[in-house]
Every structure is written in structure tokens, then in C-alpha cells.
Amino acid sequence: MDPLDKASKSMEILRLRLSENLERLRADGRLAAPQAPAGSARPEPARQKARLAVQKRLDTLDPNDPAFAERAADAFVESVLLAEFGDEFSNDANFRQLILDVSREMRLDPAMSERLARLFAELRAG
């Protein structure tokens, strides 16, 4: 079973929270509306893109680093957001703050933190 399948409920919660936060930022005028490419549809490859991006980012982190959980969660949130909503947000200062806020919220929830730890271990194991 794909490790991301186990996190599908978590990802759905994350997607909902992030969509709400992005809409709030847009409504407040702190984030520009995305420009969708012509003829684009969000197919399954977005999920594969996120999975590969998370694995690649985790491979660059030292699992013995005391800040590993924090950095891995940040990388996870960023990778999922970019795969889901596109790269146009990557240079936005509010986007980085959103990543940090969501990552912190996820790590503060004991059940979510445990799920993330299992996901990161499985992704690192390949």
C-alpha cells in the first residue's frame, strides 16, 4: 500500500484547511488569485507529484537532526500545496507563513503528528 494512501484522510483535512486559508488570504487581499493554465485539469498526477516531491525533500534531511520532524512536516505541507495549487504561490511571503502555520498545527496535534512520523518513516524506507 502506498504510504500516502494511509494519509488520505489527513491530506483531505489539510486540503480543506489550506483551501480555507488561501481563500481568506485572497479575500483579505494578501494573496493574488492563481492564474490557471489554459485547458488545465487537476488529474491524479498531482498526487504523484506530491509523493515524489516529499520523498525527494525527505532524502535531503538528516533523520538524526533534532529538528527533523519540523523540517519534514514543513516539506510535506509545501510539497502537497505546490502539487495541489501550483507553483505560482512559491514566491509569495504569505505562502511561506501558511506552510509554517499549517505544519505547526499538524505537529501540535498528537494523532496527526504520529501519522506524519509513520508516513515519513515509510517514505524514507522506500
Image (spheres, rainbow, N blue to C red):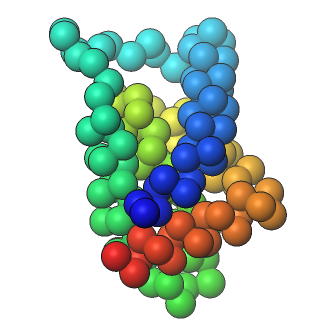
Answer yes or no: is residue 99 visible. Answer: no
Furthest residue in direction bottom, as rendered: 64
Answer yes or no: is residue 7 visible. Answer: yes
Kindly identify the residue that appears in the image at 36 percent across and 48 percent down. Answer: 50
Query: Residue 55 placed where, x, y %?
Result: 35, 65
Q: Is residue 31 above or below residue 94?
A: above
Q: Is residue 66 above or below residue 47?
A: below
Looking at the image, residue 93 sits to the left or right of residue 59; the answer is right
Looking at the image, residue 1 sits to the left or right of residue 120; the answer is left
Kindly identify the residue that appears in the image at 50 percent across and 84 percent down. Answer: 63
Q: In terms of image quadrants, where is residue 57?
A: bottom left
Quadrant location of the C terminus?
bottom left
Kindly identify the residue that appears in the image at 29 percent across and 47 percent down. Answer: 49
Furthest residue in direction left, as rendered: 38
Looking at the image, residue 28 sits to the left or right of residue 54; the answer is right
Query: Residue 67 placed where, x, y %?
Result: 60, 76
